[in-house]
Structure formats: C-alpha cells, structure tokens
Image: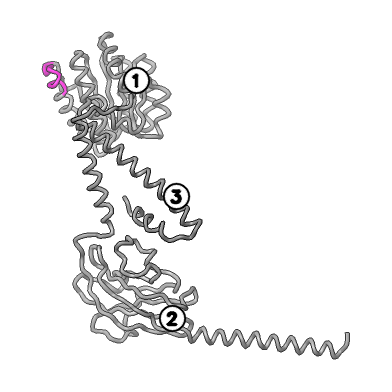
Amino acid sequence: MNPQALIGQRIVCMVVWTLLVSGWLCYSALAQTSISAPQDMRVFDTPSDGGGSLTVQWAPSSWDGPDTRYQVLAGDAAVTDPAALTIIAEFPGNSKYVKDAKTAWWTRNVDKTWHQVLVRSAKGFEVKDGTSYAVALAAVQGDQRVFSQVLVASPSPDWFNWNQLNNLIIALSFGGLVFYTISYAKRHEIFLRRIPGLDAVDEAIGRATELGKPILYLTGAHDLHDPSTIAAAVILGKVAKRAALYETELLVPHREPITMAVCQEITKQAYLEAGKPDLFKEDANFFITADQFSYTAAVDGIMLRKKPAANFFMGAYFAESLLLTETGASTGAIQIAGTDSDHQLPFFVTTCDYTLIGEELYAASAYLSKEPVQIGTLLGQDIGKAVVLSAIGIGIVLATVGAVTGAQWPQLFLDLLRDLK
C-alpha cells in the first residue's frame, strides 16, 4: 500500500475518534448541567385514608430516567433548609407515577404521568396525625443534587374512602335489585331449573320410611363460619320436616358443638312446623368428636350397624369424603351429596346417586321450600352474577382494543372495575 495513503487513513481515523470523544464529553457535560429542581411540587394530606401519611406530587421532567434519582426528604415543620431534612425515600427518576398508585381515576387531581409518593412512618421518622411536617424533594444525577422548595402539611384521617365509591354504588344497586326480585317473586311464578338431586329427596325419605330404616344426615367438616355449612343446616330443616311427616328416624352426627346446637333448634322447629313435636328427639343431633378420622370411623360404624336407607352429605368435606360415601354405598343406601369443595366432587359423583355441585347447594333451600323471599333472592343473585360476567367480558374486549390500537379511552372503564372486591 502507498505510504502516503496509509498516513491519510490514520489521520482520518484520528479525526473521527477525536470528534466522537468530543461529542461524548459534550453530551456528558450537557447531561450533567440539564438537571433542575422538581417543578410544581405539591404536599397535602393523603385523601381517603385512615391517616398517618402525606402525599407528594410533582410534574415529570424531560431528564427523568434510570440515571437520575429522586429523594424525598421530611422533618420538623420549623426546618426551612431542605439539606437539613431526613431522606425517607429514594428511587429512580422513571418510577413512582400517579398511574401506579392504588387510587381511582375519579379521585385524581393531576395527570396520571405525574410523580406521586406517600410519606409514611419509617425507621427514625414517625408520622403522626395532626402534626405538621416539612417536606422537600431532591433531584440527584451524578455529583449534582438540586432541591425543591420546602412545603408544610399535616396528616389526618378521613371519614369516607372516595376510591371505593364504585363499590358503594354497586352494593346499593345490587341490594335494590334483590329487593325488587323478591317483590317480583311474590307476584309472579319464577321458573327454577330442575335439580335431580333435590327431586330425589322425597324419594330417599320415602324409601327409608318403607324399609323402616333411619335417615343419616351430615353437615360437613366446617363450622357455621362457612357458607356451605349454613346451607347444609338450612337443607337439614327441609329434610327433618319431611322425615317428621313420614315419622322416619333421623340421625345427625356432628363434629362441631356449635353447629350441633344450631341444628338441634332447626330440627325442633321442623318437627313443630310438621305438627309432630312429640316425635322430636333431642339426641337426634349428637356430637362425636372434632378429630377428622375418628369422626369418620364413628360414622362408618353407624352406617354398618344401623344401615340407614338414605344418606345425605351436605357441606364442606376433605379426605374423609370417599371413606364415608364408599361405606354408605356398600350398605345399599340412596346417597345424595352437595358440596362446594371442588377437590371432593369427583368422589361424590362416583359414589353417590345424586350430587349437588357448587351453586346448587346454595339454591337447594329455595328449590325445596318454594318460598318467594328465597326464590327472589336467588333470582337477584343470578342477575348480579350475569352482570359481573358481562362486565368481565366487556373488560376483556376493551383491554384488547386498548392494547391493539393504543387508545386511552378503554382505560377509564378498566379503572372503574379495577378496585372491585
């Protein structure tokens, strides 16, 4: 290669390298000097909370990014120098936005692209209601640190959480809907889907009467804090009333004393309504043990000794379900189960003649009694579920539209539904 050409190439490379280094140095110097104090800073008591916190908001800056940081400083209200305040939070400049906070869109007083931080009690710094505090911000980049003005605010608790306004409206609407459906049920006949397991209740009790054998009824493994146990106790009242009319013996073993006491009263009331109070026996409901498998063994023994003609398994169950139902099936009894324990449903479906699945357990009382209040309540619940499912479907469609098109308007509806509990 020509030596002059080689020297020329080297000169060109040196010039290019010098320009690149100079540009990088200029960019670094510019970046270092572009930082400024946070703008439009606001400090106020956090709205719709129980007290003990302040909210800090400020406008986004053009230099926000992972290379810059914000510091939140707080201290006594008498302090006017921000450098003398305590650092209680520090985070990258591209984080902590209004859109990330757990607030509803109708309570926001600034754009969702603004920064927002809550000042709460931390190690070495306690926030008390009714006490004023000085709060400031610092923007940090490299060796630079720029402070905002110092603002003073005091926290206090609020009576109402406006972020949950949608929940209040929905609860009142649902309550009004249930009252309307109850009124409608009193004036009109409402169709109820046929549930074979409940239609077979009379058949099972009639068979036990014909054979002169007792009826065995179990209320599950949980206490009355579980809705499924409450539903089982309500169904017991209907079964006990039919058993009283047919003068058939009823056996209800329990593993929870409070449930036993409640079921005793329910059974007694059922016999009174049937006009057979003299047939009621206090020991029809009896306590065995709270231990899971001891209870299971005892009930299996009752099945093998007394050989009841009808077995009812209502409520919540666990590993004992198959042990109970297999023993009952071996005695030739008609077995009707009802549970919302989805992990036990396969065993009940396999070993029982009829099984109430999930919601059918809760609808059983209305189905058996045909009382307008219960049927109307059931109708109101079904309409409410349909509305919720429709809202979920619409939300999925709107979220998809927003993601595909980049439009912002679907987010308003999604925010409305986000905090529903």
How far separated are the C-alphas under marks 3 and 1? 44 Å
Please tell me whether residue 275 belongs to the stretch shown in magenta. Answer: yes
Q: How far across and how far down the image is residue 236, in percent?
A: 23, 25
Colour setup of the view: one colour
Q: Name the residue under label 2.
A: 140
Residue 288 visible, this orientation: no
Q: Is residue 26 above or below residue 201?
A: below
Under mark 1, the amino acid is Gln
Q: Contact, CB < 8 Å: mark 3 with mark 1?
A: no
Residue segment shown in magenta:
270-278
Determine crowd level at label 1: few under 14, some 14-19, many 20+ residues with C-alpha closer than 10 A.
Answer: many
Question: Which is more N-terminal, label 2 or label 1?
Answer: 2
Q: Position of residue 38 (x, y in %)?
A: 38, 80
Kindly identify which residue carries mark 1: 335
Give the SS element for disc 3.
helix
Most frequent secondary structure within the magenta stretch: helix
Q: Is residue 413 left or right of residue 400?
A: left
- The span from disc 2 to disc 3 (Cα, nearest Å) is 42 Å
Specify which label sits upstream in the sequence, 2 or 3: 2
Secondary structure category for the residue under label 2: strand
Q: Residue furthest right?
A: 1
Instruction: Give the residue pinned by disc 3.
Output: 397
Give the mark toward the camera: 3 or 1.
Answer: 3
Residue 166 in percent (x, y) is at 28, 54
Q: Residue at x 50, y 58 (%)?
A: 405
**Disc 1, SS:** strand
Asked if residue 332 can be seen in this view, the reply is yes
Quarter occupied by residue 208: top left
